[in-house]
Image (cartoon, rainbow, N blue to C red):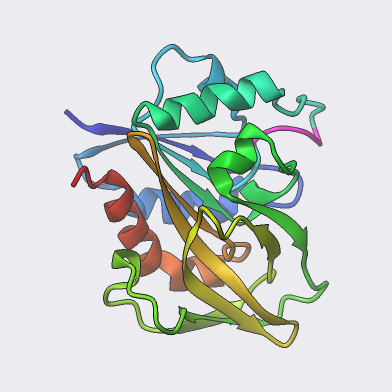
Amino acid sequence: MPKKVTVISNDMYHFYETYEPISKRLFSGPEWELTMQDYIRPVVEAAEKPDLLINFTIGCGKPDNNAHLTLDEQKVLEQAVEAGMRALYVHASMAVVAAGSPMYALTLGRFASHPKEHDPVFCCAIPGTHHPIMKGIAPFEAPDEHYFCTVDLEKATPFLATISVAGTEIGGWSQLKGKGRVVSLTPGHTVAMLDKMEPLLRNAIQWLMDDN
């Protein structure tokens, strides 16, 4: 039976057209059943959760006045991961995440700032780390919106560094949460970066879906 994947991929700064091609490439095989949507709330409200939830955006808020998830709604997603759902948070999905919230317990990171310009961002394994997600991943670089985030290093397992003229930052981390798994990646604003990230995204998905 195909694994069900829901991708959240559209807001006022991050567009469906940016994330559709990479999503369709990642989940083109018969082992996947892909659904792409703008909003996260239908996932919260659905009785059956996807096997894998991918957030390229926060899936709520402006421009449509679709209210941000309440703490109770966020808790539903946290409980779904603890019960076995897998979640991948990319770039803008870490915006508007409050410290101490159930969403922060999932992302383990929250947006702090980014430079105005889309400068080249160099991505590589953090020296001394040996995460399975980085196996076979060569350093890569592309213009992008270089996110700087507050990361819960007591719970997160960092594996990716991002470097630009603005500085050096942790760009990827993972966690085991109950029966589920979560990966957070800060790059991914531009099509150029998403194309370079594809091997990393494939490895992240493979790690997320591994039950061993």
Residue ID at (65%, 19%):
72
Residue 185, compared with residue 143, is above or below; it is above
Q: Is residue 61 magenta?
A: yes
Taking the image as shown, residue 72 lies to the left or right of residue 132, namely right
Residue ID at (28%, 73%):
135
Q: Is residue 106 magenta?
A: no
x, y percentage for residue 199? 35, 68
Residue 126, compared with residue 174, is above or below; it is below
In the image shown, does 63 or 159 lie closer to the viewer?
A: 159
Residue 191, compared with residue 88, is above or below; it is below
Which residue, as the protein is rendered here, is positioned at the far front?
A: 154
Residue ID at (21%, 42%):
211
Which residue, as the protein is rendered here, is positioned at the far top?
A: 47
Q: Which residues are magenta?
A: 59-63
Taking the image as shown, residue 2 lies to the left or right of residue 6, namely left
In the image shown, does 190 or 171 lie closer to the viewer?
A: 171
Q: Quadrant of residue 61?
A: top right
Q: Main SS type for the magenta part?
A: loop
x, y percentage for residue 158? 48, 66
Q: Quadrant of residue 125?
A: bottom left
Q: Quadrant of the N terminus?
A: top left
